[in-house]
Amino acid sequence: MEHMINNLDIFICPMCGGDLKIAKNIHCLKCFKEYRIESGIPLLFCSHGKADITQTMQGFYSETPFPNYEDLENMGDLIDKAERSVFMRMLNDQVPFNIRVLEVGCGTGQLTNYLSSANREVIGTDMCLNSLRLAENFKEKNQLKRASFYQMNLFRPIFKEESFPLVICNGVLHHTNDPLGGLISISKLVKRGGYIIIGLYNKYGRLMTDIRRAIFNMLGERVMFLDPHLRKHVTSQTKKYAWFKDQYKNPHESKHTIDEVLKWFDSIGFEFINSIPKSKVFRGFSENELLFKQNPKGNRIEHLVVQIQQMLAGSQEGGLFLMIGKRR
Protein backbone atom coordinates (compact mmCIF):
# COMPACT_ATOMS: atom_id res chain seq x y z
CA MET A 1 0.00 0.00 0.00
CA GLU A 2 3.04 2.29 0.18
CA HIS A 3 2.55 3.43 -3.41
CA MET A 4 -1.10 4.42 -2.93
CA ILE A 5 -0.36 6.21 0.33
CA ASN A 6 2.43 8.23 -1.30
CA ASN A 7 0.34 9.09 -4.37
CA LEU A 8 -3.13 9.45 -2.86
CA ASP A 9 -3.57 12.82 -4.59
CA ILE A 10 -4.06 11.16 -8.02
CA PHE A 11 -6.66 8.61 -6.85
CA ILE A 12 -10.45 8.98 -6.84
CA CYS A 13 -13.40 6.82 -5.92
CA PRO A 14 -14.51 4.96 -9.07
CA MET A 15 -18.11 5.16 -7.91
CA CYS A 16 -18.50 8.91 -7.36
CA GLY A 17 -15.14 10.54 -8.12
CA GLY A 18 -14.60 11.56 -4.49
CA ASP A 19 -11.32 11.71 -2.60
CA LEU A 20 -10.08 8.62 -0.80
CA LYS A 21 -8.48 7.91 2.55
CA ILE A 22 -6.66 4.80 3.70
CA ALA A 23 -7.13 3.17 7.07
CA LYS A 24 -7.45 -0.59 7.40
CA ASN A 25 -9.25 -0.48 4.07
CA ILE A 26 -9.83 2.29 1.50
CA HIS A 27 -12.71 4.69 2.13
CA CYS A 28 -14.39 7.31 -0.05
CA LEU A 29 -14.84 10.64 1.71
CA LYS A 30 -17.80 11.55 -0.52
CA CYS A 31 -20.04 8.49 -0.93
CA PHE A 32 -18.51 6.53 2.00
CA LYS A 33 -18.01 3.38 -0.07
CA GLU A 34 -15.37 1.04 1.32
CA TYR A 35 -12.87 -0.92 -0.81
CA ARG A 36 -10.91 -3.93 0.37
CA ILE A 37 -7.23 -4.75 -0.04
CA GLU A 38 -6.32 -8.34 -0.85
CA SER A 39 -2.85 -9.84 -1.34
CA GLY A 40 -1.50 -6.28 -1.28
CA ILE A 41 -3.77 -5.26 -4.18
CA PRO A 42 -6.39 -2.52 -3.72
CA LEU A 43 -9.71 -3.85 -5.03
CA LEU A 44 -11.10 -0.71 -6.66
CA PHE A 45 -13.15 -2.41 -9.35
CA CYS A 46 -16.58 -0.85 -9.79
CA SER A 47 -19.26 -1.84 -12.28
CA HIS A 48 -20.17 0.91 -14.72
CA GLY A 49 -23.84 0.00 -14.63
CA LYS A 50 -24.29 -1.02 -18.26
CA ALA A 51 -25.16 -4.48 -19.53
CA ASP A 52 -21.81 -5.78 -20.72
CA ILE A 53 -19.58 -8.84 -20.71
CA THR A 54 -17.20 -7.72 -17.98
CA GLN A 55 -18.16 -10.54 -15.64
CA THR A 56 -17.77 -13.10 -18.43
CA MET A 57 -14.31 -11.76 -19.31
CA GLN A 58 -13.28 -11.74 -15.65
CA GLY A 59 -14.20 -15.42 -15.39
CA PHE A 60 -12.37 -16.28 -18.60
CA TYR A 61 -9.05 -14.69 -17.60
CA SER A 62 -9.35 -15.90 -14.02
CA GLU A 63 -9.31 -19.45 -15.37
CA THR A 64 -6.52 -18.83 -17.89
CA PRO A 65 -4.36 -15.81 -17.01
CA PHE A 66 -2.47 -14.64 -20.10
CA PRO A 67 0.46 -14.47 -20.48
CA ASN A 68 1.67 -16.57 -17.56
CA TYR A 69 5.04 -16.48 -15.82
CA GLU A 70 6.08 -20.01 -16.68
CA ASP A 71 9.89 -20.18 -17.14
CA LEU A 72 10.26 -16.62 -15.80
CA GLU A 73 12.04 -17.13 -12.51
CA ASN A 74 13.63 -13.70 -12.13
CA MET A 75 13.93 -10.24 -13.64
CA GLY A 76 16.68 -11.37 -16.00
CA ASP A 77 14.32 -13.94 -17.52
CA LEU A 78 11.60 -11.29 -17.99
CA ILE A 79 14.04 -8.86 -19.61
CA ASP A 80 15.27 -11.57 -21.99
CA LYS A 81 11.70 -12.37 -22.99
CA ALA A 82 10.62 -8.72 -23.33
CA GLU A 83 13.58 -7.72 -25.45
CA ARG A 84 12.79 -10.39 -28.02
CA SER A 85 9.87 -8.08 -28.85
CA VAL A 86 11.04 -5.12 -30.94
CA PHE A 87 8.15 -3.00 -29.67
CA MET A 88 8.79 -3.68 -25.97
CA ARG A 89 12.50 -3.03 -26.41
CA MET A 90 11.73 0.28 -28.14
CA LEU A 91 9.38 1.30 -25.35
CA ASN A 92 12.01 0.66 -22.74
CA ASP A 93 14.61 2.58 -24.74
CA GLN A 94 12.41 5.57 -25.58
CA VAL A 95 10.04 6.13 -22.66
CA PRO A 96 11.86 8.65 -20.41
CA PHE A 97 13.01 7.77 -16.91
CA ASN A 98 11.32 9.23 -13.84
CA ILE A 99 7.86 9.58 -15.35
CA ARG A 100 4.55 8.02 -14.36
CA VAL A 101 3.18 5.43 -16.81
CA LEU A 102 -0.22 3.70 -16.68
CA GLU A 103 -0.92 0.32 -18.28
CA VAL A 104 -4.67 -0.30 -18.52
CA GLY A 105 -5.55 -3.99 -18.81
CA CYS A 106 -2.08 -5.11 -17.73
CA GLY A 107 -3.11 -8.76 -17.33
CA THR A 108 -0.30 -10.54 -15.50
CA GLY A 109 1.73 -7.33 -15.48
CA GLN A 110 4.76 -8.38 -17.49
CA LEU A 111 5.06 -5.07 -19.36
CA THR A 112 4.44 -3.06 -16.18
CA ASN A 113 7.13 -4.97 -14.29
CA TYR A 114 9.55 -4.73 -17.23
CA LEU A 115 9.20 -0.96 -17.72
CA SER A 116 9.42 -0.29 -13.98
CA SER A 117 12.90 -1.86 -13.84
CA ALA A 118 14.32 1.23 -15.61
CA ASN A 119 13.56 3.83 -12.93
CA ARG A 120 9.98 4.65 -13.93
CA GLU A 121 6.84 4.67 -11.80
CA VAL A 122 4.60 2.20 -13.66
CA ILE A 123 1.06 1.40 -12.57
CA GLY A 124 -0.74 -1.66 -13.90
CA THR A 125 -4.52 -2.03 -13.66
CA ASP A 126 -6.73 -4.94 -14.60
CA MET A 127 -10.17 -6.32 -13.75
CA CYS A 128 -8.90 -9.88 -13.10
CA LEU A 129 -7.58 -10.43 -9.59
CA ASN A 130 -5.94 -13.76 -10.45
CA SER A 131 -3.82 -12.07 -13.11
CA LEU A 132 -2.92 -9.24 -10.74
CA ARG A 133 -1.80 -11.74 -8.09
CA LEU A 134 0.70 -13.20 -10.54
CA ALA A 135 1.93 -9.69 -11.35
CA GLU A 136 2.23 -8.72 -7.69
CA ASN A 137 3.98 -11.97 -6.74
CA PHE A 138 6.63 -11.47 -9.43
CA LYS A 139 7.08 -7.85 -8.39
CA GLU A 140 7.58 -8.77 -4.73
CA LYS A 141 9.86 -11.69 -5.52
CA ASN A 142 12.11 -9.43 -7.59
CA GLN A 143 11.81 -6.35 -5.34
CA LEU A 144 10.49 -4.07 -8.07
CA LYS A 145 9.83 -0.99 -5.97
CA ARG A 146 8.44 1.19 -8.78
CA ALA A 147 5.70 -1.14 -10.06
CA SER A 148 2.24 -1.22 -8.49
CA PHE A 149 -0.99 -3.01 -9.29
CA TYR A 150 -4.68 -2.14 -8.80
CA GLN A 151 -7.95 -3.83 -9.70
CA MET A 152 -9.92 -1.41 -11.87
CA ASN A 153 -12.70 -1.22 -14.44
CA LEU A 154 -11.41 0.91 -17.34
CA PHE A 155 -14.90 2.40 -17.71
CA ARG A 156 -14.66 3.58 -14.08
CA PRO A 157 -11.07 4.88 -13.67
CA ILE A 158 -9.60 5.26 -10.20
CA PHE A 159 -7.34 8.17 -11.21
CA LYS A 160 -7.92 11.88 -11.67
CA GLU A 161 -7.93 13.23 -15.20
CA GLU A 162 -4.59 14.19 -16.76
CA SER A 163 -2.51 12.17 -14.28
CA PHE A 164 -0.22 10.42 -16.78
CA PRO A 165 2.11 11.50 -19.61
CA LEU A 166 1.76 8.01 -21.11
CA VAL A 167 -1.13 5.52 -21.04
CA ILE A 168 -0.79 2.07 -22.64
CA CYS A 169 -3.78 -0.15 -23.41
CA ASN A 170 -2.73 -3.08 -25.58
CA GLY A 171 -5.07 -5.90 -26.53
CA VAL A 172 -7.87 -4.82 -24.19
CA LEU A 173 -10.48 -2.55 -25.77
CA HIS A 174 -11.55 -5.15 -28.35
CA HIS A 175 -12.64 -7.41 -25.47
CA THR A 176 -15.23 -4.85 -24.29
CA ASN A 177 -18.72 -4.12 -25.59
CA ASP A 178 -17.79 -0.49 -26.23
CA PRO A 179 -14.19 -0.01 -27.44
CA LEU A 180 -14.69 3.67 -28.28
CA GLY A 181 -16.33 4.32 -24.92
CA GLY A 182 -13.39 2.61 -23.23
CA LEU A 183 -10.94 4.75 -25.20
CA ILE A 184 -12.83 7.93 -24.26
CA SER A 185 -12.65 6.90 -20.59
CA ILE A 186 -8.92 6.20 -20.42
CA SER A 187 -7.93 9.05 -22.77
CA LYS A 188 -9.03 11.54 -20.10
CA LEU A 189 -6.21 10.23 -17.91
CA VAL A 190 -3.57 11.46 -20.40
CA LYS A 191 -1.94 14.83 -19.74
CA ARG A 192 -2.10 17.58 -22.37
CA GLY A 193 0.74 16.83 -24.76
CA GLY A 194 0.95 13.27 -23.45
CA TYR A 195 0.59 10.04 -25.40
CA ILE A 196 -1.69 7.03 -25.60
CA ILE A 197 -0.83 3.67 -27.14
CA ILE A 198 -3.68 1.30 -28.00
CA GLY A 199 -3.49 -2.17 -29.51
CA LEU A 200 -6.53 -3.62 -31.29
CA TYR A 201 -7.40 -6.59 -33.47
CA ASN A 202 -7.37 -5.56 -37.09
CA LYS A 203 -10.36 -6.41 -39.29
CA TYR A 204 -8.10 -7.70 -42.07
CA GLY A 205 -5.14 -8.91 -40.03
CA ARG A 206 -7.44 -11.08 -37.92
CA LEU A 207 -8.95 -12.90 -40.90
CA MET A 208 -6.55 -15.88 -40.85
CA THR A 209 -7.20 -16.33 -37.14
CA ASP A 210 -10.95 -16.32 -37.81
CA ILE A 211 -10.51 -19.00 -40.46
CA ARG A 212 -8.43 -21.17 -38.13
CA ARG A 213 -11.03 -20.68 -35.36
CA ALA A 214 -13.75 -22.01 -37.66
CA ILE A 215 -11.59 -25.05 -38.48
CA PHE A 216 -10.84 -25.68 -34.79
CA ASN A 217 -14.56 -25.49 -33.99
CA MET A 218 -15.27 -28.13 -36.65
CA LEU A 219 -12.31 -30.48 -36.18
CA GLY A 220 -11.28 -29.88 -32.58
CA GLU A 221 -7.91 -29.28 -30.95
CA ARG A 222 -6.21 -32.09 -32.88
CA VAL A 223 -5.51 -29.61 -35.68
CA MET A 224 -3.92 -26.99 -33.40
CA PHE A 225 -0.75 -27.29 -35.48
CA LEU A 226 -2.43 -24.95 -37.99
CA ASP A 227 -1.49 -22.05 -35.72
CA PRO A 228 2.18 -21.06 -36.28
CA HIS A 229 2.68 -20.24 -32.58
CA LEU A 230 1.48 -23.69 -31.58
CA ARG A 231 3.96 -25.37 -33.96
CA LYS A 232 6.93 -23.94 -32.08
CA HIS A 233 8.76 -26.74 -30.29
CA VAL A 234 10.25 -24.28 -27.77
CA THR A 235 6.80 -23.36 -26.45
CA SER A 236 5.61 -25.38 -23.44
CA GLN A 237 2.23 -27.06 -23.35
CA THR A 238 1.02 -24.59 -20.72
CA LYS A 239 1.93 -21.61 -22.90
CA LYS A 240 0.39 -23.25 -25.95
CA TYR A 241 -2.86 -23.82 -24.08
CA ALA A 242 -2.96 -20.22 -22.79
CA TRP A 243 -2.35 -18.88 -26.33
CA PHE A 244 -4.98 -21.19 -27.82
CA LYS A 245 -7.60 -20.15 -25.26
CA ASP A 246 -6.85 -16.44 -25.64
CA GLN A 247 -6.86 -16.48 -29.45
CA TYR A 248 -9.58 -18.99 -30.27
CA LYS A 249 -11.87 -19.46 -27.26
CA ASN A 250 -12.23 -15.90 -26.03
CA PRO A 251 -15.90 -15.15 -25.30
CA HIS A 252 -15.84 -11.75 -27.01
CA GLU A 253 -13.73 -9.75 -29.44
CA SER A 254 -14.23 -6.99 -31.99
CA LYS A 255 -12.12 -5.99 -35.01
CA HIS A 256 -11.16 -2.53 -36.18
CA THR A 257 -9.37 -0.63 -38.93
CA ILE A 258 -6.77 2.12 -39.15
CA ASP A 259 -9.34 4.57 -40.55
CA GLU A 260 -11.73 3.83 -37.69
CA VAL A 261 -9.10 4.53 -35.02
CA LEU A 262 -7.99 7.73 -36.78
CA LYS A 263 -11.59 8.94 -36.51
CA TRP A 264 -11.61 7.97 -32.84
CA PHE A 265 -8.45 9.97 -32.21
CA ASP A 266 -9.92 13.05 -33.90
CA SER A 267 -13.13 12.77 -31.91
CA ILE A 268 -11.34 12.70 -28.52
CA GLY A 269 -8.78 15.43 -29.29
CA PHE A 270 -5.73 13.32 -30.12
CA GLU A 271 -3.48 13.62 -33.15
CA PHE A 272 -2.04 10.57 -34.88
CA ILE A 273 1.69 10.00 -34.23
CA ASN A 274 2.66 6.49 -35.29
CA SER A 275 1.42 2.97 -35.88
CA ILE A 276 2.62 -0.62 -36.10
CA PRO A 277 2.46 -1.58 -38.91
CA LYS A 278 2.99 1.77 -40.60
CA SER A 279 -0.19 3.38 -41.90
CA LYS A 280 1.56 4.56 -45.08
CA VAL A 281 2.86 2.12 -47.70
CA PHE A 282 6.58 1.90 -48.47
CA ARG A 283 7.43 3.13 -44.97
CA GLY A 284 8.59 0.02 -43.19
CA PHE A 285 8.92 -0.18 -39.42
CA SER A 286 12.61 -0.43 -38.48
CA GLU A 287 14.38 -1.20 -35.21
CA ASN A 288 15.63 2.41 -35.22
CA GLU A 289 12.09 3.78 -35.30
CA LEU A 290 11.26 6.73 -33.07
CA LEU A 291 7.92 5.69 -31.62
CA PHE A 292 6.82 9.17 -30.56
CA LYS A 293 7.91 11.07 -33.68
CA GLN A 294 5.00 12.17 -35.86
CA ASN A 295 4.51 10.17 -39.07
CA PRO A 296 2.29 10.68 -42.15
CA LYS A 297 -1.18 9.22 -41.75
CA GLY A 298 -1.41 7.88 -45.31
CA ASN A 299 -4.74 7.69 -47.11
CA ARG A 300 -7.59 5.18 -47.19
CA ILE A 301 -6.11 3.24 -50.13
CA GLU A 302 -2.75 2.99 -48.38
CA HIS A 303 -4.44 1.86 -45.19
CA LEU A 304 -6.23 -0.89 -47.11
CA VAL A 305 -2.97 -2.06 -48.71
CA VAL A 306 -1.16 -2.09 -45.34
CA GLN A 307 -3.95 -4.12 -43.73
CA ILE A 308 -4.09 -6.62 -46.59
CA GLN A 309 -0.33 -7.02 -46.23
CA GLN A 310 -0.87 -7.73 -42.56
CA MET A 311 -3.39 -10.41 -43.47
CA LEU A 312 -1.05 -12.00 -46.04
CA ALA A 313 1.83 -11.98 -43.55
CA GLY A 314 -0.02 -14.68 -41.63
CA SER A 315 -1.61 -12.56 -38.93
CA GLN A 316 1.48 -12.25 -36.79
CA GLU A 317 0.69 -11.58 -33.12
CA GLY A 318 -2.90 -12.58 -33.76
CA GLY A 319 -3.66 -9.73 -36.14
CA LEU A 320 -2.95 -7.00 -33.59
CA PHE A 321 -2.12 -3.46 -34.70
CA LEU A 322 -0.90 -0.55 -32.58
CA MET A 323 -1.79 3.14 -32.82
CA ILE A 324 -0.05 5.97 -30.98
CA GLY A 325 -1.79 9.29 -30.41
CA LYS A 326 -0.84 12.58 -28.74
CA ARG A 327 -3.31 14.65 -26.73
CA ARG A 328 -3.71 18.11 -28.20
Image (cartoon, grey):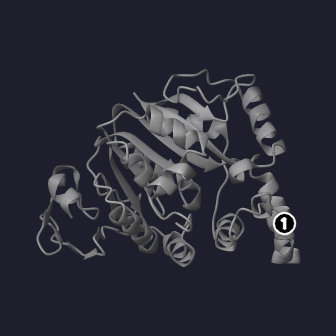
Q: Is residue 206 left or right of residue 328?
A: right
x then y, percent, for residue 193: 36, 28
* Residue labelled with disc 1: 225
Q: How many marks?
A: 1
The picture quadrant where one finds residue 4 is: bottom left
| Other-residue count near label 1 (Cα within 10 Å), few / some / many at <14 / 14–19 / ≥20 | few
Residue 144 percent coordinates (x, y): 33, 56
Q: Is residue 214 above or below residue 199?
A: below
Q: Where in the figure is residue 70, as x and y percent of width and height?
A: 56, 68
In percent of width and height, residue 74 lies at: 45, 60
Quadrant of the image for the N terminus? bottom left
Which quadrant, please, contains the C terminus? top left
Quadrant of the rendered structure where residue 101 is?
A: top left
Identify which residue is drawn at 70% across, 23% down.
283
Under circle 1, the secondary element is helix
Front-lying residue, 83 or 39: 83
Q: Amino acid at mark 1?
A: Phe
Q: Is 59 drawn above or below residue 288 in the view shown?
A: below
251 and 266: which is toward the camera: 251
